[in-house]
């Protein structure tokens, strides 16, 4: 599976996806206009790429169509992850991208026969499964870091609030309010 020996349409789609990913990443999470724009551009690009595939035949056409679908899926998944801005959305996007890449790789395997084809499919599955496992590990690591940060913050707040207990009246109120503000409680 040589990913660098791609069809010119594939290279153009990959470059376009990369541009969308970079542009989408530069936008703030939750920008619905940018999200809608990227989805519309993905659809337009997909339709143009699919139309170019019509002049092909056989497995070359199948590969071309799979690449067009994958490029669209990658752009849409990235746009959605950027729009939602959550670890789950980024994980879902990484899974969708891994599946899209797998679909293309599997189509490329159709040019092979026998054991070569079997090996090709197994390698494609391994790449997909590895990408999904990496996405899951990254999601879980971020979740664990966030939980640890919350726990540390709560512990620091409790320690600071305990210092305020030695005070009375307005001084205690001010101390408690300051601790709440400092630790976002």
Image (spheres, rainbow, N blue to C red):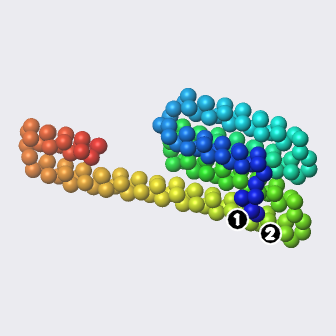
* Location of mark 1 (residue): 126
Q: Are marks 2 and 1 in contact (CB under 8 Å)?
A: no
Under tag 2, what secondary structure?
helix
At mark 1, the secondary structure is helix
Q: In this view, does 18 lie above or below 124?
A: above
Quarter-of-image position of residue 131 = bottom right
Residue 86 percent coordinates (x, y): 50, 44
Image quadrant where one finds the N terminus: bottom right
Mark 2 crowd level (few <14, some 14–19, many ≥20, 10 Å Cα) = some
Whether residue 115 sits left or right of residue 77 in the image: it is: right
Within 10 Å of the Cα at label 1, are there few (<14), some (14-19), or many (20+) other Cα atoms? few
Question: Residue at 72% of width from left, 49% of height from top?
Answer: 11
Q: Where is residue 151 in the image (x, y as percent from the top left)?
A: 34, 55
Looking at the image, which residue is at 19% across and 40% down? 177
Q: 83 or 160: nearer the eye? A: 83
Q: Position of residue 120 (x, y in %)?
A: 79, 65
Q: Is residue 67 visible?
A: no
In space, the residues marked 2 and 1 are separated at their CA atoms by 10 Å
Is residue 160 left or right of 166 when viewed as pictured? right
Residue 110 visible somewhere in the drawing? yes
x 9%, y 50%: residue: 166
> Which disc is residue 91 wearing?
none
Which of the two labelled residues, at mark 2 and mark 1, occupies the earlier sequence position?
2
Farthest-out residue, front:
8
């Amino acid at each position: 599976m040589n990913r660098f020996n791609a069809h010119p349409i594939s290279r153009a789609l990959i470059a376009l996806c990369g541009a969308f990913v970079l542009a989408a990443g530069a936008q703030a999470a939750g920008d619905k206009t940018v999200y809608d724009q990227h989805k519309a551009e993905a659809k337009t690009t997909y339709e143009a790429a699919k139309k170019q595939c019509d002049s092909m035949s056989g497995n070359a056409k199948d590969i071309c169509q799979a690449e067009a679908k994958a490029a669209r899926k990658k752009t849409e998944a990235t746009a959605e992850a950027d729009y939602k801005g959550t670890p789950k959305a980024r994980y879902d996007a990484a899974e969708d991208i891994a599946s899209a890449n797998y679909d293309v790789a599997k189509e490329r395997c159709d040019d092979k026969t026998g054991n070569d084809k079997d090996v090709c499919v197994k390698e494609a599955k391994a790449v997909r499964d590895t990408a999904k496992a990496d996405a899951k590990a990254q999601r879980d690591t971020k979740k664990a870091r966030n939980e640890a940060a919350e726990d540390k913050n709560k512990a620091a707040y409790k320690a600071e609030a305990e210092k305020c207990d030695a005070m009375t009246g307005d001084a205690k109120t001010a101390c408690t309010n300051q601790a709440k503000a400092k630790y976002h409680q």
